[in-house]
Image (cartoon, coloured by chain):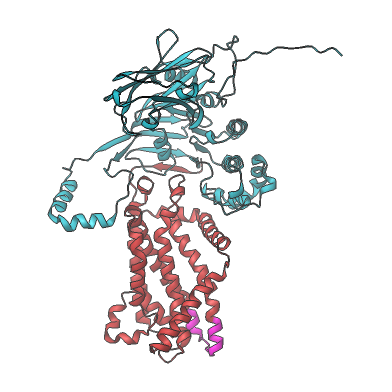
Chain colours: A red, B cyan
């Protein structure tokens, strides 16, 4: 007999869970593939939606915050300044929104088939990562247009920033997904919550505007990510390794809490969904 | 040899919340805390200390059995007997509250046909998606792909989104994917009920084939006693969350038919899932033969009387009553008959009485059927118990002279006819 499964009442988090997750990696791929395929089949403009959304937002922000409100942008043209922020922010916020809804959206599958439930939120974030890469094309265009070339250090740091964003989105999303199953009204409050977060994250303004308070803002892992993404790509400030460390720490903590909360209620999803 | 499935003392407890069917809103919980913080704390403390009385109910209790490799085991029982809960625990969808299960082999479950099918995706794409959800690897699916398509018979529509499929095609494709799964243990819930008879037969044949050839073990939950009988070597009978009996299929089905399908008297007073003005209420259901003797099972070809007793507090308010009786099998309607069809309206009525539906030479085929009833008073629905008011077992047709007959287990009707032969001279 190749595999033996033992089913017992309570299961705490175990390293075998990771092994199991690895065994189900193809399902992870298929869920992401399904979401992308369906979305691009349903929306008429397809993949361009991923470009369109951040681009229009950038234009509007540039007009209102850049030109009219004269928001400082660390000496960088405002469109490219805000686009770097938006790129990471939209990856984070859309991943967070999707992740927290993923269990409800897939309840038909959850109540009928077993698979490690963690796959669902992770695949939701992976889907958004694809959008991120598509939207990055605009950034490349903007950088060429404004004549910015990132240095090598800057390029090397980008994957790290993405990983931090990924962990923060998955972590916060896991907790929210678990809460969402129990309290169904949470999802109505979430868009508001995300909107508030946008304003305490230096997306439309530079972090320097917050002065000494920027230290408190560092709890928000997206602050470190966005500020350093600008440093890496546009050379606005030198790369702040302390801030990256703080962001990484915050996102790891978020992820651990998320996994803990998720695992705690995971086995009972099918009963309460 | 060790059994492939060992179930030891499995129990599953559910806590009944009063807001059944409604989800809990965080807003409500926060409001409760804000309004009565101390009451909330006391309540919380009580439940932590285990003092708080919760309404609990055991959907399963003390279930133990073991199954050897290559067996096909059926699970039968009434609605709510715990069949589906047991299957959900075996397939790890929900955990047991107590006990332990050991499964020695790869488990595949088919609790629903086409789980995860996406209407926008094509048949080809859904095969891969569904396969992945069921736990197949991409390599496995690629090697089985042609067989899956062929079995489902959808070659021409492979690249059509499944939202354009007929329900028959949809079911065929879904079952086909599941049937080609290379698992050692296959758990199947009432899924065949949806396909057409021809396909059901094909599926049963396929299931038989895979157990014979690959020595696969199958657990099969069904209301269709015919399918259980023709497929399963042994059967488990569930009753109220307990395992009533396990043994050879013929023996268990016989026991079930004789002891558990009780339609002698179905008390409808306590049924809460009902609709209507309530001016007149159905309170009891039973069946009789043509001579007034109460029956527990019916024989096809015999006359049968379905008796609905009612009570009415204000009979003078009713002028005319129309009463209907419906028969269904696996949720599919088989027959509906209202008294108004034959222009028989009753009225005036008394404060209590019986409506009697006489079925002449009952044309139902062998199987279990659900009975429904609805009463309309003066054009307004007076009482409609939404769930079935009873399940009836139809057996041993007396229509047939040959007792060794075999009818297709999926057929629902036997037309009372006769054959003859006419020679033609050229």
Query: Whole-percent x and y of residue B69?
Result: 51, 32
Q: Is residue A79 in view?
A: yes
Residue nearest the viewer, comparing B147 with A73: A73
Residue B179 placement: quadrant: top right
- Magenta span: predominant SS is helix
- Residue sitting at the far bottom: A75
Query: Whole-percent x and y of residue A107?
Result: 43, 50
> Does B424 sit above or below residue A27?
above
The residue under the point 36% across, 45% down is: A271
The residue under the point 41% across, 79% down is: A226
Where is the C terminus of chain B found, in terms of image quarters? top right
Q: Is residue A237 in view?
A: no
Residue nearest the viewer, comparing B386 with B174: B386
> Does A54 sit above or below residue B327?
below
- Residue sitting at the far top: B291
Which residues lie in the magenta part? Answer: A140-157
Query: Whole-percent x and y of residue B366?
Result: 52, 20
Residue nearest the viewer, comparing A198 with B151: A198
Q: How many marks?
A: 0
Q: Judge whether residue B282 is colored magenta.
A: no
Query: Whole-percent x and y of residue B113?
Result: 53, 41
The residue under the point 15% across, 50% down is: B45
Q: Judge whether residue A152 is colored magenta.
A: yes
Residue nearest the viewer, comparing B212 with A53: A53
> Does B282 sit above or below residue A24?
above
């Amino acid at each position: 007999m190749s595999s033996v499964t033992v089913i017992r009442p309570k299961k705490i988090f175990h390293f075998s869970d990771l092994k199991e997750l690895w065994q189900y990696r193809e399902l992870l791929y298929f869920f992401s593939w399904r979401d992308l395929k369906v979305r691009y089949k349903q929306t008429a403009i397809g993949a361009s939606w991923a470009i369109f959304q951040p681009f229009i937002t950038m234009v509007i922000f540039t007009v209102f915050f850049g030109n009219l409100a004269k928001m400082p942008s660390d000496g960088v043209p405002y469109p490219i300044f805000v686009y770097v922020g938006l790129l990471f922010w939209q990856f984070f916020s859309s991943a967070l929104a999707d992740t927290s809804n993923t269990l409800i959206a897939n309840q038909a599958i959850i109540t009928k088939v077993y698979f490690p439930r963690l796959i669902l939120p992770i695949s939701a974030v992976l889907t958004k990562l694809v959008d991120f890469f598509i939207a990055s094309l605009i950034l490349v265009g903007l950088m060429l247009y404004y004549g910015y070339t990132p240095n090598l250090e800057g390029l090397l740091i980008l994957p790290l920033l993405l990983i931090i964003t990924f962990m923060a989105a998955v972590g916060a999303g896991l907790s929210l997904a678990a809460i969402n199953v129990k309290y169904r009204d949470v999802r109505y409050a979430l868009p508001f919550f995300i909107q508030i977060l946008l304003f305490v994250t230096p997306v439309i303004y530079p972090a320097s505007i917050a002065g000494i308070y920027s230290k408190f803002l560092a709890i928000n892992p997206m602050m470190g990510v966005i500020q350093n993404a600008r440093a890496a790509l546009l050379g606005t400030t030198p790369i702040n390794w302390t801030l990256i460390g703080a962001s990484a720490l915050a996102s790891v903590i978020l992820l651990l809490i998320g996994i803990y909360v998720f695992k705690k209620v995971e086995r009972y999803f099918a009963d309460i969904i | 040899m060790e059994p492939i499935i060992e179930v030891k003392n499995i129990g599953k407890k559910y806590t009944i919340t009063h807001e059944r069917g409604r989800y809990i809103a965080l807003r409500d919980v926060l409001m409760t805390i804000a309004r009565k913080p101390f009451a909330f704390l006391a309540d919380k403390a009580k439940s932590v200390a285990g003092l708080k009385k919760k309404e609990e109910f055991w959907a399963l209790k003390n279930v133990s059995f073991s199954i050897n490799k290559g067996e096909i085991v059926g699970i039968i029982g009434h609605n709510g007997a715990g069949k589906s809960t047991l299957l959900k625990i075996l397939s790890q969808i929900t955990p047991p509250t107590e006990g332990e299960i050991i499964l020695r082999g790869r488990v595949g479950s088919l609790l629903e046909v086409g789980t995860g099918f996406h209407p926008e995706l094509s048949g080809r794409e859904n095969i891969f998606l569904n396969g992945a959800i069921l736990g197949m690897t991409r390599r496995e699916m690629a090697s089985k792909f042609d067989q899956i398509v062929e079995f489902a018979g959808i070659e021409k529509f492979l690249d059509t989104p499944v939202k354009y499929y007929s329900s028959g095609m949809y079911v065929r494709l879904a079952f086909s994917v599941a049937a080609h799964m290379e698992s050692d243990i296959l758990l199947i819930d009432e899924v065949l009920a949806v396909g057409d008879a021809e396909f059901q037969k094909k599926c049963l044949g396929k299931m038989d084939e895979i157990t014979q050839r690959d020595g696969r073990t199958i657990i099969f939950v069904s209301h269709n006693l015919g399918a259980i009988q023709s497929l399963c070597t042994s059967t488990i009978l569930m009753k109220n969350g307990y395992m009533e009996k396990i043994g050879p299929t013929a023996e268990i089905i016989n026991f079930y038919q004789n002891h558990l399908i009780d339609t002698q008297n179905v008390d409808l007073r306590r049924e809460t899932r009902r609709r209507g003005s309530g001016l007149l209420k159905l309170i009891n259901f039973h069946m009789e033969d043509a001579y007034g003797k109460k029956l527990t099972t019916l024989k096809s070809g015999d006359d049968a009387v379905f008796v609905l007793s009612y009570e009415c507090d204000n009979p003078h308010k009713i002028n005319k009553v129309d009463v209907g009786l419906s028969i269904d099998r696996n949720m599919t309607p088989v027959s509906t008959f209202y008294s108004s069809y034959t222009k028989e309206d009753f009225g005036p009525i008394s404060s209590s009485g019986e409506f009697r539906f006489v079925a002449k030479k009952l044309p139902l085929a062998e199987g279990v059927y659900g009975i429904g009833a609805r009463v309309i008073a003066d054009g307004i629905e007076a009482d409609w118990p939404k769930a079935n008011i009873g399940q009836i077992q139809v057996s041993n047709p007396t229509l047939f002279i040959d007792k060794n007959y075999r009818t297709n287990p999926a057929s629902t009707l036997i037309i009372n006819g006769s054959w003859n032969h006419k020679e033609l001279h050229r």
